[in-house]
Image (cartoon, rainbow, N blue to C red):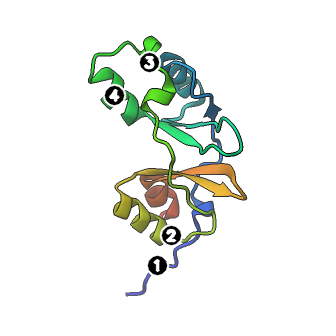
Amino acid sequence: MSVPNWGPVRDCMRTEVTEVDGSIDVLTALKIMKKVGQTSLIVKRRDEQDEHGMLLFSDIAKQVIAKNRAPERVNVYEIMAKPVITVRPDMEIRYCARLFENFGIGHAPVAENGKIIGMVSYYRLVLHGLPNLD
């Protein structure tokens, strides 16, 4: 039995990434997520010295719904993850999976030259990264 030839993250990342301002409320963020069909959003940097943030569906479930908070009264910056671990588009899929395991994460922005160019998740790694699934 041979070891699979894992490709780079670039081959399985989602390239449609939506960026939002951290000052918007969670209800607005949810409406954007629904409109674009994504379960995560990148939160824009405020300036060149700032870092990107990320908002996941799970953040909303844990920090808004479970705590019975009104989504229109909570700002994204209050519940987002920041800074976030990013991966390079040329990182091998197997190393990305190990990184996720090591840090207990399931999503990461893909960054190249300081710019977010995609998003990768366990879902994408497995369904779009495993060779010969077609």
The earlier-in-sequence mark between 3 and 1 is 1
What amino acid is at disc 4?
Gln
User: Gap between marks 2 and 3, in whole Å?
Assistant: 42 Å
Cα distance between the residues tagged 4 and 2: 37 Å
Q: Dot 3: what SS?
A: loop
* Tag 2–tag 3 contact (CB < 8 Å): no
Callout 2, which amino acid? Pro
Tell me: residue 109, above or below residue 26.
Answer: below
* Alpha carbon distance from label 4 to label 3: 10 Å
Query: Which of the pair 98/67 is nearer the observer?
Result: 67
Comparing labels 3 and 1, the label whose residue is closer to the camera: 3
- Residue 72 or residue 89, whichever sits in front: 72
The mark nearer the N terminus, 2 or 1, is: 1
Quadrant showing the N terminus: bottom left
- Label 4: state its secondary structure: helix
Is residue 112 found left or right of 79 in the rendered image? right
The residue shown at (42%, 16%) is 71
Q: CA distance from mark 4 to mark 1?
A: 39 Å
Q: What mark, if any, has residue 131 been given in the picture?
A: 2
Q: Position of residue 115 (x, y in %)?
A: 70, 51
Instruction: Give the mark, 4 or 3, whose residue is nearer the N terminus.
Output: 4
Callout 4 touching callout 3 (CB < 8 Å): yes
Q: Nearer the viewer, mark 4 or mark 2?
A: 4
The residue to which callout 1 is attached is 4
Q: CA distance from mark 3 to mark 1?
A: 45 Å
Q: Position of residue 128 (x, y in %)?
A: 52, 58
Q: Hey, which quadrant is residue 98 in on the image?
A: bottom left
Task: Please state if 19 lies on the left or on the right of 79 as rendered.
Answer: right
